[in-house]
Image (spheres, rainbow, N blue to C red):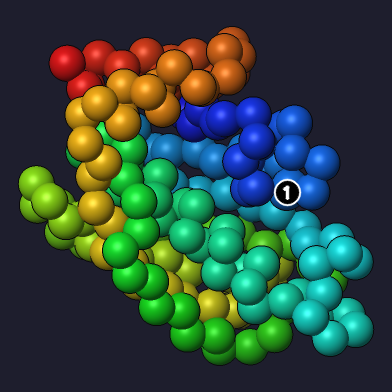
Amino acid sequence: MELPHTAGCLVCGRQNPHGLKLSLHVDESTGVVSVSFTPRPEHIGFEGIVHGGVLATVLDEAMVWAATWAGKRFCVAGEMTVRFRQSAAVGGALRVETRVDSNRSRLIQTSGTIIDSAGALVAEASGKYVPVPSERHRHVLTTLVNESSTADAATLLKEGSR
């Protein structure tokens, strides 16, 4: 199921001219959030190698969505740790998968990986996410872009917060 987005998000926002414009998906049965992307030349750190900050940003986005989906309330990062296992090549397809490891009312712990097209582990991460207050959550819901491809997930988020 495709997850909704806000217009200006750096990772998933379609109207952000500097953004990645990625579409994240959640497996309803497991809560695993995934996204595939191919880094472009403007995402380099060193020539031909993807900047680690770009990789960490995509991991954070996927982990915050895993936490948000699990609690049906938007979350913010409290802590994130990334371990880079090997470099990722610009132009090479990458797959990110994240999941919730523990879910308590005020803290959701997540983990995730980035795998390249050959199946090699590029990076792995863990994160601690904090649900936002109800009022902030309701406000974020009003900023979601209304699209048919994300309508089901947006509805479930809205219903889950009641």
x, y percent for residue 143 = 50, 22
Which residue does the numbered mark 1 point to in the structure image? 20
Left or right: residue 138 versus residue 44 is left
x, y percent for residue 132 = 26, 41
Q: Which residue is drawn at 35% across and 51% down?
A: 76
Q: Can residue 57 be seen in this view?
A: yes
Q: Residues within 10 Å of mark 1 (few under 14, many from 20)?
A: many
Q: Residue at x 51, y 62 (%)?
A: 59
Find residue 52 and report its image quarter.
bottom right
Left or right: residue 70 versus residue 66 is left
x, y percent for residue 129 = 28, 57
Closer to us: 13 or 32: 13
Closer to us: 34 or 69: 69
Furthest residue in direction front, as rendered: 135
Q: In this view, does 7 lie above or below 111?
A: above
Mark 1, secondary structure of its residue: loop
Q: In this view, does 63 lie above or below 139?
A: below
Q: Which residue is drawn at 70% across and 54% down?
A: 37
Q: Is residue 35 above or below residue 153?
A: below
Q: Residue at x 47, y 85 (%)?
A: 83
Find residue 88 and report its image quarter.
bottom right
Which image quadrant: the C terminus? top left
